[in-house]
Image (cartoon, rainbow, N blue to C red):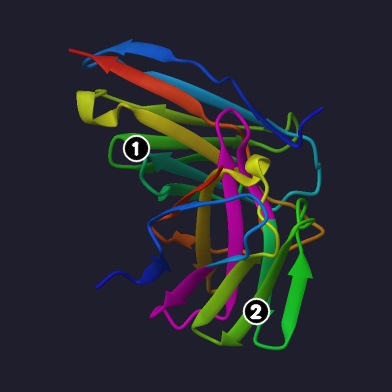
Amino acid sequence: DADVTQTPRNRITKTGKRIMLECSQTKGHDRMYWYRQDPGLGLRLIYYSFDVKDINKGEISDGYSVSRQAQAKFSLSLESAIPNQTALYFCATSVSGDAGYTFGSGTRLTVV
Amino acid sequence: QKEVEQNSGPLSVPEGAIASLNCTYSDRGSQSFFWYRQYSGKSPELIMFIYSNGDKEDGRFTAQLNKASQYVSLLIRDSQPSDSATYLCAVNKAAGNKLTFGGGTRVLVKP
Protein backbone atom coordinates (compact mmCIF):
# COMPACT_ATOMS: atom_id res chain seq x y z
CA ASP A 1 0.00 0.00 0.00
CA ALA A 2 1.13 3.53 -0.76
CA ASP A 3 2.41 5.67 2.11
CA VAL A 4 0.32 8.65 0.96
CA THR A 5 -2.99 7.82 -0.71
CA GLN A 6 -5.12 10.28 -2.62
CA THR A 7 -8.67 9.71 -3.76
CA PRO A 8 -10.05 10.00 -6.33
CA ARG A 9 -7.25 9.61 -8.91
CA ASN A 10 -9.28 11.34 -11.59
CA ARG A 11 -12.42 13.42 -11.40
CA ILE A 12 -14.49 15.41 -13.83
CA THR A 13 -16.99 17.77 -12.29
CA LYS A 14 -19.23 20.58 -13.41
CA THR A 15 -18.85 24.27 -12.67
CA GLY A 16 -20.49 25.20 -9.40
CA LYS A 17 -20.33 21.74 -7.85
CA ARG A 18 -18.74 21.06 -4.48
CA ILE A 19 -15.98 18.50 -4.54
CA MET A 20 -13.72 16.97 -1.91
CA LEU A 21 -10.28 15.49 -2.51
CA GLU A 22 -9.03 13.18 0.19
CA CYS A 23 -5.58 12.35 1.43
CA SER A 24 -4.53 9.75 3.98
CA GLN A 25 -1.07 8.71 5.08
CA THR A 26 0.61 5.89 6.96
CA LYS A 27 3.95 7.70 7.38
CA GLY A 28 3.10 8.97 10.85
CA HIS A 29 4.06 12.50 9.77
CA ASP A 30 2.49 15.48 11.49
CA ARG A 31 2.89 17.86 8.55
CA MET A 32 0.58 17.66 5.56
CA TYR A 33 0.25 19.87 2.50
CA TRP A 34 -1.94 20.41 -0.53
CA TYR A 35 -0.38 21.65 -3.75
CA ARG A 36 -1.74 22.15 -7.24
CA GLN A 37 0.34 21.78 -10.37
CA ASP A 38 -0.30 23.59 -13.62
CA PRO A 39 1.89 23.34 -16.73
CA GLY A 40 4.77 25.80 -16.54
CA LEU A 41 3.81 27.02 -13.07
CA GLY A 42 5.26 24.26 -10.98
CA LEU A 43 3.71 23.30 -7.67
CA ARG A 44 1.86 25.98 -5.76
CA LEU A 45 0.87 25.64 -2.12
CA ILE A 46 -2.85 25.78 -1.31
CA TYR A 47 -3.02 24.88 2.39
CA TYR A 48 -0.83 23.20 4.95
CA SER A 49 -1.19 21.78 8.44
CA PHE A 50 1.49 21.04 11.02
CA ASP A 51 -0.84 19.16 13.36
CA VAL A 52 -4.54 18.41 13.79
CA LYS A 53 -5.32 21.80 15.32
CA ASP A 54 -3.13 23.81 12.95
CA ILE A 55 -4.36 24.94 9.52
CA ASN A 56 -2.59 27.55 7.42
CA LYS A 57 -3.30 29.20 4.08
CA GLY A 58 -0.79 28.88 1.31
CA GLU A 59 -0.20 31.20 -1.62
CA ILE A 60 -3.37 30.28 -3.53
CA SER A 61 -6.04 29.39 -0.95
CA ASP A 62 -8.93 31.38 -2.43
CA GLY A 63 -11.75 29.08 -3.51
CA TYR A 64 -10.45 26.18 -1.41
CA SER A 65 -10.94 24.92 2.14
CA VAL A 66 -9.41 22.08 4.10
CA SER A 67 -10.15 19.80 7.01
CA ARG A 68 -7.62 17.89 9.12
CA GLN A 69 -9.80 15.13 10.48
CA ALA A 70 -6.94 13.22 12.12
CA GLN A 71 -3.17 13.12 12.04
CA ALA A 72 -3.40 10.82 9.06
CA LYS A 73 -6.16 12.56 7.08
CA PHE A 74 -6.21 15.91 5.32
CA SER A 75 -9.01 16.78 2.89
CA LEU A 76 -9.24 19.57 0.34
CA SER A 77 -12.60 20.97 -0.73
CA LEU A 78 -13.61 23.13 -3.62
CA GLU A 79 -16.82 24.78 -2.44
CA SER A 80 -17.96 25.85 -5.91
CA ALA A 81 -15.68 24.51 -8.62
CA ILE A 82 -14.68 26.74 -11.52
CA PRO A 83 -12.84 25.81 -14.74
CA ASN A 84 -9.55 27.48 -13.75
CA GLN A 85 -9.33 25.02 -10.87
CA THR A 86 -8.65 22.33 -13.43
CA ALA A 87 -5.23 21.02 -12.42
CA LEU A 88 -3.26 18.16 -10.94
CA TYR A 89 -3.54 18.19 -7.15
CA PHE A 90 -0.94 16.66 -4.86
CA CYS A 91 -1.04 15.91 -1.18
CA ALA A 92 2.33 15.67 0.58
CA THR A 93 3.62 14.89 4.04
CA SER A 94 6.83 15.62 5.90
CA VAL A 95 8.33 14.88 9.29
CA SER A 96 9.98 18.29 9.71
CA GLY A 97 10.74 21.56 7.98
CA ASP A 98 14.14 20.38 6.81
CA ALA A 99 12.96 17.03 5.55
CA GLY A 100 11.74 16.43 2.05
CA TYR A 101 8.17 15.66 1.24
CA THR A 102 6.53 12.38 0.39
CA PHE A 103 3.90 12.95 -2.27
CA GLY A 104 0.72 11.12 -3.01
CA SER A 105 -0.04 9.91 -6.52
CA GLY A 106 -2.09 12.97 -7.33
CA THR A 107 -5.67 13.74 -8.31
CA ARG A 108 -6.33 15.00 -11.81
CA LEU A 109 -9.32 17.31 -11.56
CA THR A 110 -11.18 18.67 -14.56
CA VAL A 111 -13.91 21.27 -14.10
CA VAL A 112 -16.18 21.66 -17.12
CA GLN B 1 10.99 37.83 -10.00
CA LYS B 2 9.88 34.33 -9.09
CA GLU B 3 11.01 33.03 -5.73
CA VAL B 4 12.55 29.92 -7.28
CA GLU B 5 13.54 30.01 -10.94
CA GLN B 6 14.48 27.25 -13.32
CA ASN B 7 14.96 27.11 -17.05
CA SER B 8 11.96 25.20 -18.37
CA GLY B 9 13.99 23.43 -21.07
CA PRO B 10 13.86 21.01 -22.64
CA LEU B 11 17.48 20.22 -21.93
CA SER B 12 18.53 17.69 -24.52
CA VAL B 13 21.45 15.49 -23.49
CA PRO B 14 23.10 12.57 -25.32
CA GLU B 15 23.11 9.27 -23.49
CA GLY B 16 26.21 8.96 -21.34
CA ALA B 17 26.77 12.73 -21.09
CA ILE B 18 26.42 15.01 -18.08
CA ALA B 19 23.17 16.91 -17.62
CA SER B 20 23.56 20.19 -15.73
CA LEU B 21 20.48 21.83 -14.22
CA ASN B 22 20.42 25.18 -12.47
CA CYS B 23 18.08 26.82 -9.99
CA THR B 24 18.20 30.30 -8.48
CA TYR B 25 16.27 31.52 -5.46
CA SER B 26 15.44 34.94 -4.12
CA ASP B 27 15.31 34.50 -0.32
CA ARG B 28 18.85 34.88 0.94
CA GLY B 29 17.93 33.25 4.25
CA SER B 30 16.82 29.98 2.68
CA GLN B 31 18.02 26.99 4.63
CA SER B 32 17.49 23.76 2.76
CA PHE B 33 17.28 22.78 -0.87
CA PHE B 34 15.79 19.81 -2.64
CA TRP B 35 15.72 18.25 -6.08
CA TYR B 36 12.73 16.19 -7.17
CA ARG B 37 12.32 14.11 -10.30
CA GLN B 38 8.87 13.92 -11.84
CA TYR B 39 7.92 11.61 -14.68
CA SER B 40 5.01 12.69 -16.85
CA GLY B 41 1.72 12.19 -15.03
CA LYS B 42 3.43 10.92 -11.89
CA SER B 43 4.16 12.42 -8.50
CA PRO B 44 7.47 14.12 -7.65
CA GLU B 45 10.13 11.89 -6.14
CA LEU B 46 12.89 13.24 -3.90
CA ILE B 47 16.34 12.52 -5.33
CA MET B 48 18.69 14.91 -3.52
CA PHE B 49 18.77 17.40 -0.69
CA ILE B 50 21.52 19.76 0.39
CA TYR B 51 21.88 22.14 3.31
CA SER B 52 25.48 23.39 3.22
CA ASN B 53 27.58 25.16 0.64
CA GLY B 54 29.54 22.88 -1.62
CA ASP B 55 28.88 19.59 -3.34
CA LYS B 56 26.94 16.55 -2.28
CA GLU B 57 27.15 13.35 -4.28
CA ASP B 58 24.76 10.41 -4.37
CA GLY B 59 25.39 7.86 -7.07
CA ARG B 60 25.17 9.55 -10.46
CA PHE B 61 23.70 12.71 -8.93
CA THR B 62 25.61 15.68 -7.53
CA ALA B 63 23.94 18.67 -5.94
CA GLN B 64 25.88 21.91 -5.67
CA LEU B 65 24.93 24.81 -3.43
CA ASN B 66 26.27 28.36 -3.44
CA LYS B 67 24.38 30.46 -0.90
CA ALA B 68 26.36 33.63 -1.64
CA SER B 69 25.23 33.53 -5.26
CA GLN B 70 21.84 32.04 -4.36
CA TYR B 71 21.89 29.11 -6.70
CA VAL B 72 21.69 25.38 -6.45
CA SER B 73 22.48 22.99 -9.26
CA LEU B 74 22.07 19.33 -10.08
CA LEU B 75 24.45 17.30 -12.18
CA ILE B 76 23.42 13.96 -13.62
CA ARG B 77 26.42 11.96 -14.76
CA ASP B 78 26.27 9.16 -17.33
CA SER B 79 22.75 10.24 -18.30
CA GLN B 80 20.37 7.43 -19.22
CA PRO B 81 17.12 7.53 -21.19
CA SER B 82 15.37 6.69 -17.90
CA ASP B 83 16.57 10.06 -16.58
CA SER B 84 14.23 11.79 -19.04
CA ALA B 85 11.84 13.62 -16.74
CA THR B 86 11.09 17.02 -15.28
CA TYR B 87 13.37 18.05 -12.41
CA LEU B 88 11.91 20.33 -9.77
CA CYS B 89 14.01 22.51 -7.51
CA ALA B 90 12.48 23.27 -4.10
CA VAL B 91 13.60 25.66 -1.38
CA ASN B 92 12.73 25.84 2.31
CA LYS B 93 12.71 29.58 2.97
CA ALA B 94 13.87 31.02 6.24
CA ALA B 95 10.44 32.29 7.27
CA GLY B 96 8.51 29.09 6.96
CA ASN B 97 8.64 25.39 7.10
CA LYS B 98 7.20 24.68 3.71
CA LEU B 99 8.74 24.25 0.33
CA THR B 100 8.56 26.67 -2.57
CA PHE B 101 9.02 25.00 -5.95
CA GLY B 102 10.45 26.18 -9.21
CA GLY B 103 8.62 25.51 -12.46
CA GLY B 104 10.86 22.58 -13.32
CA THR B 105 13.35 21.76 -16.07
CA ARG B 106 12.43 19.09 -18.58
CA VAL B 107 15.34 16.82 -19.45
CA LEU B 108 15.44 14.62 -22.53
CA VAL B 109 18.18 12.01 -22.77
CA LYS B 110 18.60 10.79 -26.32
CA PRO B 111 20.03 7.32 -27.02
For mark 1, give the secondary structure: loop
Residue A83: give x, y in percent of width and height: 64, 41
Q: Mostly what secondary structure, the magenta segment?
A: strand
Q: Nearer the viewer, mark 1 or mark 2?
A: 2
Residue at the spot of label 1: B39
From this viewpoint, is residue A103 visible? yes
Question: Splitting the image into 4 quarters, where does residue A81 fall?
Answer: bottom right
Instruction: Name the subunit of mark 1.
Output: B
The magenta segment is A21-45
Q: Amino acid at mark 2?
A: Ser
Relative depth, front residue between B105 and B57: B105
Q: CA distance from mark 1 to mark 2?
A: 29 Å
Q: Quadrant of the N terminus of chain B?
A: top right
- Mark 2 lies on a secondary structure that is strand
Side (left or right) of B33 relative to B57 = right
Rendered position, A74 above or below A17:
below
Give coordinates of residue B32: x percent, y percent.
Answer: 63, 52
Return the residue found at the far left: B111
Please name the residue shown 24% across and 23% down the image: B78
Q: Amino acid at mark 1?
A: Tyr
Q: What percent of the width, then of the height, locates residue A2?
A: 30, 69
The one of B58 and B10 positioned closer to us in this rendering: B10
Badges 1 and 2, same chain: no
A66 in magenta? no
Nearer to the camera, B61 or B99 = B99
Q: Which residue is mark 2?
A: A67
